[in-house]
Image: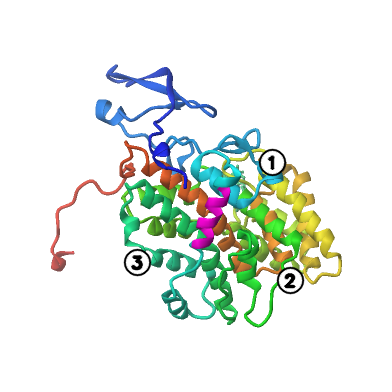
Amino acid sequence: MTDLTSMASQKLASRESDSVTLIEKATGRHIVLPVLEGTAGAKTIDVRNLYRELGYFTFDPGFMSTASCESKITFIDGGKGLLKYRGYPIEQLALHSTYPEVCYLLLYGDLPTAEQLDSFNGSIKNHALLNEAMRVFYRGFRHDAHAMAIMVAAVGALASFYPEALNVHDPRDREISAHRLIAKMPTLAAWSYTYSVGRPFVYPRNDLDYTANFLHMMYGRPDKDFIANETFVRAMDLILILHADHEQNASTSTVRLTGSSLASPFAALSAGIGTLWGPAHGGANESVIRMLEDILASGRDLRHYINRAKDKNDRFRLMGFGHRVYKNYDPRAKIIREMCHKILAELGADNPNQPLLDVAMELERIVLEDDYFVQRKLYPNVDYYSGIIFRAMGIPANMFTVIFALARTVGWLAHWMEMMSEPQSRISRPRQLYTGVEHREYVSIDKR
Ligand code: ACO
């Protein structure tokens, strides 16, 4: 097993390249703030001493201009449409790699040798079973519980089985927790699905690769073997690779924030899953299909929905379009779009999802030519196509975000491990711009 102590000794690597001076107009008081530069990306003003020296906070709701940490894992250039894991362009990983290899890369920083990958896969397979008590845990949910609600609870519940995971300052304990989570997530995800459809839980199989094993647990039955369609396995593996990490997005920031209190990684990931669930984040892939279903059921012209999306008095948005960081084509969407079209071609025009898929393709075509979307750089995002692929593969809508969570588990863990191995890490505690009542004297209830 790779020795994580080498990761633990990785120090912050940014360098001070310049400075900016902030002057208070009224008094002339000033502060010189260092400008930090990483290996790529925007220069960053280091405001850590601002409050101590001048008594100011910075104000940045939504973190539009704030780097919350230093990281070596993933780089995005939203303007150019670039995404790299540990320096490797996503296009190369999508073409040549597999999800377990990408997991290794994200966790350990380098692509594995054959021997390292073998050992990593062995460890993951070894940890794929759930404690049998989890079977009873699942039975506590209503049959129609949303799979993401089950996932939030089930991943949090795992903390109770692994109290040693609280040794968050021990690199070996962190590594075991990471392997456990990566290994158990497909089992948890598949069981959330089988439970909802009343089928028996299917155990993991050690002779299958990670992605094929997940599909086996989703669709397998004790009474007959499940043979996965090769294209579907490859498509699923590709989707997992594309979703594996995305730097400091809302769910990863949640995992870091929760982990910063030295909480169990199982609790931190459960919090991350909760954040991912929202339709403005990972829940968008489910919302895409719900929107397309509504459009199809209404029988209305697509223009009606496009006009609604443009209307500032209407909260309706076209799900699966736009991105906080990418103001160019999301590179993941480019890759997955190709896979999406391949799957649709393979399924042929007579598959039952074809009318929905036709609406999706027509919407994509119109939006890419519409001035409103072109001017705002609102391209289809990765969720648009993953939603369509999942639907084409017959995966139910409430499992879409669960699969995203399964894929992103390694990204969350890589960030958590990076943060925990940083000697200077401390609890995340943002401040605020208070605009409430400044002071009031208590008035007894009979005088109000
Ligand atoms: N449909 C219609 N208009 C949109 C959309 C959309 N999907 N997305 C953005 N816009 C418009 C906004 O109304 C705004 O217009 P304005 O400048 O005239 O006011 C402009 O584009 C900029 O939008 P913001 O909301 O400022 O962009 P922000 O970066 O805050 O939001 C987000 C990004 C949340 C992804 C947004 O584009 C959205 O809601 N998209 C739909 C949901 C979705 O697909 N989410 C998945 C994100 S990818 C992921 O999590 C993996």
Q: Which residue is mark 1?
A: 91
Residue at horizontal 75%, vertical 61%? 230
Left or right? Give the position of 382 relative to 22: right
Residue 99 magenta: no
Name which of mark 2 and mark 1 comes first in the sequence: 1
Q: Is residue 264 visible?
A: yes
Left or right? Give the position of 275 relative to 346: left
Q: Nearer the viewer, residue 276 or 335?
A: 335
Q: Which residue is mark 2?
A: 297
How packed mark 1 is, by other alpha carbons closer than 10 Å (few <14, some 14-19, many 20 or more), is some
Kind of residue at badge 1: Glu
> Which residue lies most toward the right here?
349
Circles 2 and 1 in contact, beta carbons < 8 Å: no
Q: CA distance from mark 1 to mark 3?
A: 39 Å
Residue 351 in picture, x, y percent from top left: 82, 69
Mark 2 or 1, which is nearer the eye?
A: 1
Label 3 residue SS? loop
Name which of mark 3 and mark 2 comes first in the sequence: 3
How packed mark 2 is, by other alpha carbons closer than 10 Å (few <14, some 14-19, many 20 or more), is few
Residue at horizontal 45%, vertical 45%? 415
Q: Quadrant of the C terminus?
A: bottom left
Q: Which residue is mark 3?
A: 160
Residue 118 magenta: yes
The picture quadrant where one finds residue 226 is bottom right
How packed mark 3 is, by other alpha carbons closer than 10 Å (few <14, some 14-19, many 20 or more), is few
Residue 204 in picture, x, y percent from top left: 56, 69
Magenta segment range?
117-126
Name which of mark 1 and mark 3 comes first in the sequence: 1
Label 1 residue SS? helix
Up-down: is 54 above or below 270?
Answer: above
Residue at horizontal 65%, vertical 41%? 90
